[in-house]
Image (tube, rainbow, N blue to C red):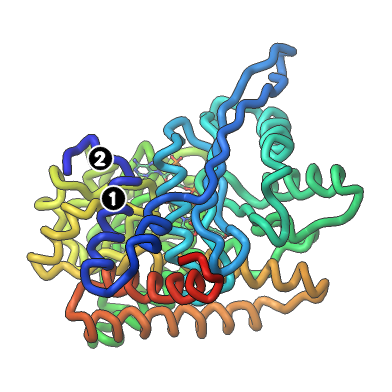
Amino acid sequence: MSNQDTAYDHVKAQIKEATDLIHVEPIVQDMLQHPKRVIQVTFPVEMDDGTSKLFHGYRSQHLDALGPYKGGLRFHPEVDLDETKALSMWMSFKCALVQIPHGGGKGGVVCDPRELSDREVRRLSRAFMEAVQDVVGPNQDVMAPDVNTDPSIMGYMMDTYSKREANFVPGIITGKPPILGGSEGRSQATAQGAVYVIEYLLNDQEMKLDETTVAIQGFGNGGQIAARLLYDLGCKVIAVSDSKTALYDQNGLDIPKAQKAKEEGELASYGEADVLDQPDDLLYIKTDILIPAALEAAIHKENVTDVQAKMIVELANGPTTPEAEKILLERNQLVIPDILANSGGVIVSYLESVQNHMNYYWDEKEILQQLKDRILNGYKRVVDHAEQHKTSYRTAAMIAAIKRLNQAISARGWN
Ligand SMILES: NC(=O)C1=CN([C@@H]2O[C@H](COP(=O)(O)OP(=O)(O)OC[C@H]3O[C@@H](n4cnc5c(N)ncnc54)[C@H](OP(=O)(O)O)[C@@H]3O)[C@@H](O)[C@H]2O)C=CC1
Ligand SMILES: O=C(O)CCC(=O)C(=O)O
């Protein structure tokens, strides 16, 4: 594979790695490799200056054997068709691995939200929902937050869809504000799930939380909350970064202070820590755990030999390319795959859908307990499959997921 490979190439390589170890009929392999439906839309949005601008968006619906499509929506300048397809495929494997009754979906709009006002983002969110409203639905395809999208955007989209249905339809989307039927615990769910996984992992490795160092790339919903939860548990979070700045302090950063600096505008205004030359330099720090929590392919063939972390916990989707992973594994650097490590988000999104369908809501304690139980089961499933098939945690996770998808495909008579 070359550096021109896309995330779509990477997920296909991961599927192959798994299906080389278990028997899967060619027709099923084909279904795994190709999304069932991909929607490409354009839609105009009125800008604050009165002009209109045309935006491009996508929704990829990979495989709905286990239930309605489920997955986030990304607002980012680099969104494209192949990336969206790959992200929808990882969603299918993630849902299957942690045994929730959903298929894989993902969407994106090509835009830079930093160049848009709040009102423009609101109009864009409503316009995207209008553009895809015929192919989504509470029992068809349920969107959720991803990079640069948040509860308020989910709220606008739910409102747009509800208006068209002339009905209150909270189950159209998850990650909403709790006042609109959002679940308690969804905002921290992705990070919290990863932190539960880290606790099990450290226990298995006979390591102590308060003796563990962590570096985190990405300081948004996933990365920032993971940093805070780990800091509160006593871990030494020695480095964090966003797209502009990487902060480093071997003695451990004051994460509440870093959060304050970020909230006020610039991680760099933290002071009292080294600012690394490039944000990516965070990846090369000597640390027990590295958590990539930004975008795909952060760790690739060209930089992997500089990655020193003992363990990589993939909070982002697809942050390690297959070629890079091979090198990490050869050097005994453990990789906890994205479809397990970041599954907390979709687990709680599923619980949000359940609550919307019931019109009855659980408290945060109940949600976090269910999240913990479900992700622990996912973790054990991965460890068991790794032992059984003598393979990496990634391939083990893919095997567990593919076995379940295969069962559902057969039960539906699609093969
Ligand atoms: N939100 C969710 O529930 C889930 C998210 N994920 C995955 O987690 C990852 C992050 O998503 P999320 O936290 O929601 O997104 P956010 O938009 O909340 O945050 C993304 C963060 O990554 C930073 N970033 C972007 N590019 C770089 C870079 N090159 N180097 C360092 N930091 C960078 C951004 O910087 P800046 O602040 O400067 O923009 C921002 O801090 C994605 O891969 C997403 O698919 C997975 C499961 C669920
Ligand atoms: O919450 C969801 O439905 C999906 C979250 C997501 O996009 C992901 O897990 O990558």
Residue 157 position (above or below residue 177): above
Q: Which mark is residue 10?
A: 1
Q: Quadrant of the C terminus?
A: bottom left
Q: Are marks 2 and 1 in contact (CB under 8 Å)?
A: yes
Q: Which mark is residue 5?
A: 2
> 212 or 92: nearer the eye?
92
Horizontal side of residue 317 vs 286, given as left or right: right
Residue type at numbered disc 2 = Asp
Across and down, in percent, residue 337 comes to: 32, 66
Horizontal side of residue 392 vs 125, given as left or right: left
Pointer 1 residue Cβ closer than 8 Å to ligand 1: no
> 280 or 26: nearer the eye?
26
Across and down, in percent, residue 28 comes to: 39, 63
> 414 or 72: nearer the eye?
414
Across and down, in percent, residue 261 comes to: 48, 46
The residue depicted at 53 percent of the width and 42 percent of the height is: 38
The residue depicted at 68 percent of the width and 68 percent of the height is: 352
Quarter of the view holding residue 100: bottom right
The residue depicted at 15 percent of the width and 51 percent of the height is: 304
- Give the secondary structure at mark 1: helix
Q: Quadrant of the N terminus?
A: top left
Residue 233 visible, this angle: no
Residue situated furthest right in the rendering: 166
Quarter of the view holding residue 46: top right
Residue 337 visible, this angle: yes
Residue 225 position (above or below residue 265): below
Residue type at numbered disc 1 = His
Query: Which of disc 1 and disc 2 is earlier in sequence?
Result: 2
- Give the secondary structure at mark 2: loop
